Image (spheres, helix red, strand yellow):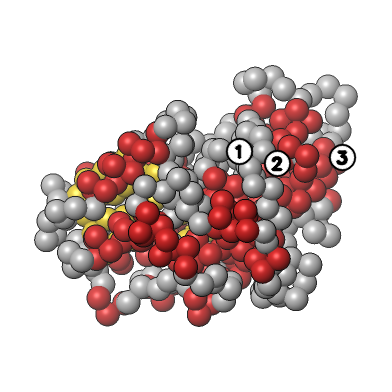
Amino acid sequence: MPGRKVFTRFFASLLLALSFNAVRIYVGFHLSNKYSLEGQIGNSSTAFLRDFVWPRNEPIVELALEVAKKPKIPPLLSNMRSVDESKLPYKCGVIFFYHIACTGGSSINKWFGKQIKLNGPHTSYWTKWGRKEKMEANFIKGVTNQTQNIGPNEWRFVHAHGMSYFPNASEAYLYQWREEVESQGCGFVVTTMLRDAIGHTISQTKGMIKPNVTLDQFMSYLEPENYNQRGLFVTQLDYLLYNMGPRNEYNATREEKVRRAVEILQRHFDVVSLGDYDIFADIIHKITGWLPEKITESNVFGGDLNYSYAELQKIKDLTEANGDVAFIDAVKHLYYGHLEHLVS
């Protein structure tokens, strides 16, 4: 882009220039700091509790009410889901992969496809996604079918992406699907891949090339006043909560969003990885007993992304204000080394 200062060593320069706070890796997540999550929900309005925390427009009413009554989970290691190593590998099950855009999910999705071919007729792959508003109803119906009548040595892989599933509003289904699969003596393994918050936003900016918009236009939906808008991209925090819907239609605080996202992870996600393909693959192999196969990186952007310091600062500030930096900090604290005891 003419007239702009170019960073020749892009990511190295980014880390140096913004080292004061751009990419933070905490050994611990201190709940007493400015991102304190404790007590935030107590200050929320009734409307927020109804619309943001409880599953809304939920057809399975009884289960939705049960979910609404569940206590809020603080972000503590003791509240995380775990895997009982003594029961591995599970003889059968369903792997539910929630694919967040620009996190390496395409590589994992293709890897699962290879695993299906490698491991014979008792493994299968299913997905239904797109960018249509009413995609979720068909997806939920399809996953419900996938969780039923599982064979004694059968593994089914389910891929959620696009507008297929909205975890914040439709959380109750995760409880229903797990109960159904586990009642058959099989494992229900929910997983996702995440990455550094600032790097993720920068990676998404490649999406401004095709519509030929400026960085200001591309990032505008993250401005505080635009909380109820859809943008040209979605951050990891918002994708986990709202998928590709408006990024914060209830105008929740970033602390409330982070608390809720971490709660969803802790309640339902068995395997959460922060960009480490090898460890992710090893853990899945251990859980399923599948033949080992490395994940090959794919869907890599081959162009250049050159920005001025001021532009990088804007990317950093808006990503942080949205809650994504605090969210990934919490994930790093909770999931660093999680399940690595399963790795051979």
> Which residue is more in the foreground, 231 or 87?
231
Residue 190 quadrant: bottom left
Question: Identity of the amino acid at label 3?
Answer: Ala
Mark nearest the camera among 1 and 3 is 1
- Could you tell me if the residues under marks 1 and 2 are in contact, i.e. CB atoms within 8 Å? yes
Question: Residue 124 appears at what percent x and percent y?
Answer: 22, 45
**Mark 1 or 3 closer to N-term?**
1
Instruction: Check residue 227 in the rendering and tell me which mark sits there, or answer none.
Output: 2
Q: CA distance from mark 1 to mark 2?
A: 7 Å
Question: Residue 122 appears at what percent x and percent y?
Answer: 14, 51
Q: For the N terminus, which image quadrant?
A: top right
- Image: 18 above or below 10: below
Q: Secondary structure at mark 3?
A: helix
Give the crowd class for mark 2: few <14, some 14-19, many >=20 residues within 10 Å: some
Q: Secondary structure at mark 2?
A: loop
Question: Identity of the amino acid at label 1?
Answer: Pro
- Could you tell me if the residues under marks 1 and 3 are in contact, i.e. CB atoms within 8 Å? no
- Image: 4 above or below 193: above
User: Can residue 8 be seen from the camera position used here?
Assistant: no
Q: Which residue is mark 1?
A: 246
**Mark 2 or 3 closer to N-term?**
2
Q: Is residue 173 left or right of residue 100?
A: left
Residue shown at 66%/35% (left/top)? Answer: 229
Residue placed farthest to the front in the image?
A: 46
Question: Identity of the amino acid at label 2?
Answer: Tyr
**Mark 1 or 2 closer to N-term?**
2
Q: CA distance from mark 2 to mark 3?
A: 23 Å
Residue shown at 33%/36% (left/top)? Answer: 138
Instruction: Check residue 310 in the rendering and tell me which mark sits there, or answer none.
Output: 3
Question: Residue 10 appears at what percent x and percent y?
Answer: 74, 42
